[in-house]
Image (cartoon, coloured by chain):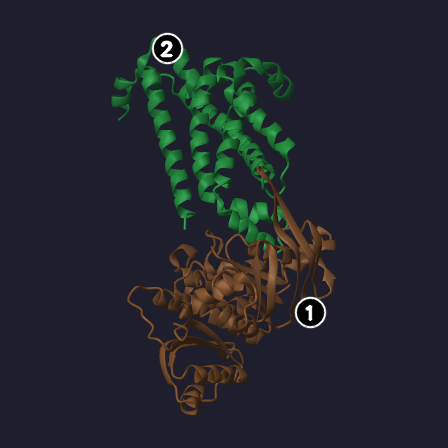
Chain colours: A green, B brown
Amino acid sequence: MEELLNRWIPNVMCRTDIFWKSVRETFVMVGWAGSISFLIGILLGVTLIITKKDGICENRLIYQVIDKIINFFRSVPFIILLVGLVPLSRLVMGTGIGVKGAIVPLIFGCAPFFSRQMESALSDVNPGLIEAAQSMGLSNVEIIWSVYIRESIAGIARGTTITIISLIGLTAMAGAVGAGGLGNFAIMYGHDRNMPDVTYTTVVVLVIIVTIVQILGNTIAKKNTH
Amino acid sequence: MAEIIIENVSKTFATADGTVEALKNVNLSIEKGDIFGIIGMSGAGKSTLVRCINLLERPSSGKVKIKDRELTAMSSKELRNSRKKIGMIFQQFNLFSARTVYENIAFPLRKSKLTKAQKKEKVESLLKLVELENKADVYPSQLSGGQKQRVAIARALASDPEILLSDESTSALDPKTTKAILNLLKKINKELGITIVVITHEMQVIKDICDRVAVMKDGEVVESGKVFDIFANPKHEVTKEIVNNTTNLSNIYELIHSDNFQLKPGQVIVKSSYVERDVSEALVSQISRMYGLDVNIIFGNIEMIGGNPIGGLVSIIQGEPEQIEQALSYLREKKVGVEVILDGRAS
């Protein structure tokens, strides 16, 4: 087995330590940026749903402001966010480069998309259920937790899957400007030093990660669809 | 003391094409233990009115009182607590699809002070009441419409409400299931003493279970009172239309206007309807004997409303013109509504 790998991907096998470090860095970036974006996404998605017209806390101003901010960050190309947010990154994380430096732009690149996914999942909740919950005397906070979120777990799982997979793509891009992770590994060795086996290995690993995330998401969604 | 009092309630909605007056100065009082029907064509404002009872729609003006406590003056927290005593069921059932039947019914109990065992006992007794004991762990998507409505009823009853609002709860169901759900509502009303407000566009629903009824049109209550009185003696056009649509007696007009219908000279077509509740006298054979008339019953429809007959007969009466006239006054004396539909005496 090892012999075979040595023959096929010699440039990866002679630097497995860097390879595994890159995999770990990718997971760190996806993990941190993903969880923070998830929380922001739920928060903004819920806010959009409840403040929109005929929502349970209708508020035109808040809706419009959040809606526009999300649109703004979704229209800025990620590569520009990466560079443009370096000062903010330095302020928050203490550095603008490496894995730590990539997390802030990754959140800005991912959270707006996440928010839209959440908004779409939550808007699938039948308005009749909200009315029924109100008739039972539930407060708005209870309605958000026990009805909106509880009823759309499957939709949230599907939206999360899509977002996490696109986030994995973003981390590879972040690698291009020195963030570390598999993207960086592929650029540094596969491209710059002309070692195609490194590039291929990276792609294969990313395909495996994406597949696992998709299967996980599908399973959760399926379990929560009745 | 009335259970629900609706006082001068108006509701206007702002739409793109200006404001719409959904309710215009509605006054109603609903007694404890009654099954109160609100009937009207779609767009009459029934659904808005029922939502004003638990303030899902806040009236633009007017007061809503439940047991002398003014809902329209409550803080939102007080209002939420009051709503727990007002159950509501809907046309589209509105069950939580991500929760099982058991979890749906237990939902209103999740913040109650009952112990886990007490909650279980309560949910199980409700399941028994609606005859769905074997469906506790099933998800709503696996139930039929009638079963879903039963679950919704059980869920609405879980917080021990004093009032149950039913918004077109049988309109999505077939006639047989409708009957079963109505019987269930009747049973709940009798056994638990819950005041029920039923919104419907179907006369049949009112006839089957309601004690009192209000008829609505264009946001106004045009008539209200005991179901028998309203439907035996409809005063407003809308009420007449609803009654005619349901008692097939109106079909007679179609018959006499058809080409192959010919009245012989001297014959009279008379529609006689019961206005009072006594049907014990053999009036048809009486007038036939007393005035030497031939009475040919061509159409009849009698339905029971609140245990009393409503409807009547259409018959062709043949005989001496004067005798016919006397017979008709005799019927009127006996408190039978008499209407000459077609008179062949003159021609």
Q: Nearer the viewer, residue A43 or B272?
A: B272
Q: State if disc 2 and disc 1 touch (CB < 8 Å).
A: no
In the image, B138: left or right of A31? left
Which residue is tagged 2? Answer: A191
Q: Is residue B129 visible?
A: no
Which residue is tagged 1? Answer: B2
Q: Is residue B228 above or below residue A152?
A: below
Q: Secondary structure at mark 2?
A: helix
Q: Quarter-wise, where is residue B282 in the image?
A: bottom left
Q: Residue A161, percent across and down?
A: 43, 34
In the image, A48: left or right of A173? right
- Residue drawn at x 63%, y 33% as measured from the top left: A60
Amino acid type of the residue tagged 2 in the rendering: His
Amino acid type of the residue tagged 1 in the rendering: Ala
Q: Is residue A64 above or below residue A153?
A: above
Outermost residue, bottom direction? B289
- Residue drawn at x 48%, y 18% as measured from the top left: A174
Q: Chain of mark 1?
A: B
- Residue drawn at x 34%, y 8% as measured from the top left: A194
